[in-house]
Image: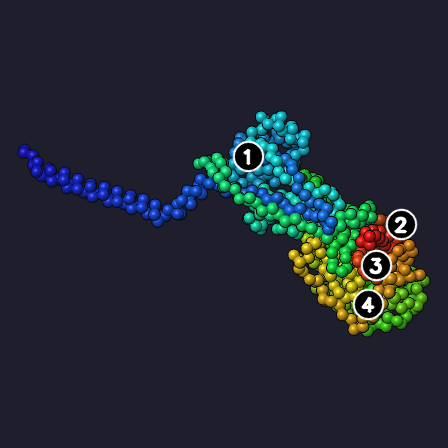
Amino acid sequence: MLRDKAGERRVVRSRLAVVSVILVLVFGAILGRVAYLQIVEHEQLTKRSQDNRIRLAPVDATRGLILDRSGQTLAENRPAFSLTIVPEQVADMDALLSELDALIDISEAERAAFAEARARSRSFQEIPLRLQLSEETVAELAINRHRFPGVEVRPRLARHYPYGQVGAHVVGYVGRINERELRQGDPNQYRSTSLTGKAGIERFYEPRLQGKLGIEHIETNALGRSIATLERRPPTPGEDIQLTLDIELQRLAEETLGDYRGAIVALDPRDGSILALASRPRFDPNALSRGIDQDTLDALNRDVTQPLFNRAIAGRYPPGSVVKPFLGLAGAAGGHINPNETLYCNGTFQLPNVSRVWRDWKPEGHGHVDLTQSVAQSCDIYFYELANDMGINAMHEWMSRFGYGQATGIDLPGERAGVMPSRAWKRETRGEPWYTGETINTGIGQGFTLATPIQMATSTALIANRGRPIRPQLLADREALSLGPTIEPVELADEAYWQHAWNGMIETVHGRRGTARRLGADLDFRMAGKTGTAQVVGIAQDEEYDEETLDARFHDHALFTAFAPVKDPRIAVAVVVENGGSGSQTAAPMAKTVIEAWLSRTDG
């Protein structure tokens, strides 16, 4: 059979034409796609390429310092060494941690923090295991370095508190950031290994102290490992914080409390500047910032003395007789008493048709007393009568105006409001009606009434200022906080009522029959004060309080509030001594020590 060469050539040419068209179309598509990528998508693809090649690494900022009013450093940053681990370089993490534990004794808290940070980090990133190493540990690790691949000792800045326990409740401490804090925090300030304020000023002013993270542009290989640093944006250091606190007065106040549990608050009544805010027992902020094991932390939390508890702002106590100048003011301003008229105190008080007898702290009574002497001698009977005449709702209204039952707004975390009871309060909180006998107890600062030492000091400043309220503040730069008082100015129909309250408090210290007269015997200035003794346990009306036979835990609390000098008040103080017994014998001398120390310095 003869071949059709012409036909075959036509078939070949047609097939070649089809293939050529396909090739042209494919090549055209490729050129079109390249052109699209190079022209249209150029900017986006360039960025994506850079993202694959360049990793952004955060750089920690230097934390701001905390200073007292004279510039003494209360919290600083010191060079230290930390122990870090790169997980991807460790074949068996459990085995490594066991070996390290035998060498440096790793705590459960450190293991937990390491595991939490590891879960939030990439395998090539260094994760801290211990934040601060001793020189001995650094030397031991250097000798044994060959045994621990992936383990590094890195220099860093560690938080340090030069005054140790002094002022610990005010300054606070820092610790590793947790998952919740990291989620809530500013991403420009924190990473998974950051430290953050946990208490005190460190916590309250955390955003200002922390600073802003810096950024390093690091070139990486295909596996994500660093090759070189291409660019670095330095971090923004945190702000330094200067406080109104005087660290030497703070030290004195804490030493004055001695082994007692309690608090001393000293402030300037003119502007609310906190001079000292002492709470005992204390704790070591350096130990907490370095990281302590869980057993030690649990022991601190279980300790019945509660060393981590800031009694100055969160301890709530029956204020006892320190409320009497305020109730006297309320009674006079509300028309319930004439401050110049006298009442005869025979040592007992009874309500009509009620068998219960309320007794004065002085069994034989005080005789004839007016408002000034009832405050000076702390006559309970006078204020039982006044409370019964006013009624609980009027007492609640007036005492709230003086700041009782409210938080002061101090710039510290954890402040608790006190309690100034009323009929509505008891119904809402306890579901019970109010009884007249409870009104009587409220008249001497007992019953349901509770106040914090900072609130007592702030209210004392209100009397010193004759009704002008202040807001207690630790930040020296008042304009930066710009917060006003939490209560309105107290205006009375007759300004002379303020003088009656002043006279009662002055007579308490300098009067012949004042409850703190021993205090004023050798003073070089005039002080206005008020003693208080608050029952911890109730005593039946047919029994007597016997401190010698009563367990120390049930001894009365001792209280004293004061301002000085009378002519130009420059310091107001509140002292609460748990189970301290008599306010005049225990708390008042402590206040005198603090006031004298401050005035001797400021007078000079």
Q: Eyeballing the image, is 315 above or below 290?
A: below
Q: Eyeballing the image, is 440 above or below 585?
A: below
The answer to whether residue 269 is seen in the rendering is yes
Q: Nearer the viewer, residue 586 or 96?
A: 586
Q: Please state the horizontal and vertical placement of residue 376, each as a whole percent of the image.
A: 88, 62
Q: Earlier in the sequence, mark 1 or mark 3?
A: 1
Which residue type carries mark 4? Trp
Q: Eyeballing the image, is 207 above or below 490?
A: above
The answer to whether residue 302 is seen in the rendering is no
Nearer to us of marks 1 and 3 is 3
Q: Earlier in the sequence, mark 1 or mark 2?
A: 1
Give me the disc on residue 565: 3
Crowdedness of circle 1 by 10 Å Cα count: few (<14), some, many (20+)? some
Q: Please state the horizontal and vertical placement of residue 21, each as a whole percent of the image.
A: 20, 43
**For the point 75% across and 45% down, which residue is it?**
166
Task: Provide the residue designation for mark 1.
Answer: 86
Question: Quarter of the image containing the N terminus?
Answer: top left
Nearer to us of marks 1 and 4 is 4
**For the point 73% across and 53% down, which residue is it?**
244
Task: Provide the residue designation for mark 2.
Answer: 549
Which residue type carries mark 1? Val
Q: Earlier in the sequence, mark 1 or mark 4?
A: 1
Q: Seen in the image, is 508 located left or right of residue 230?
A: right
Q: Seen in the image, is 530 located left or right of residue 109?
A: right
Question: Which secondary structure, mark 1?
Answer: loop
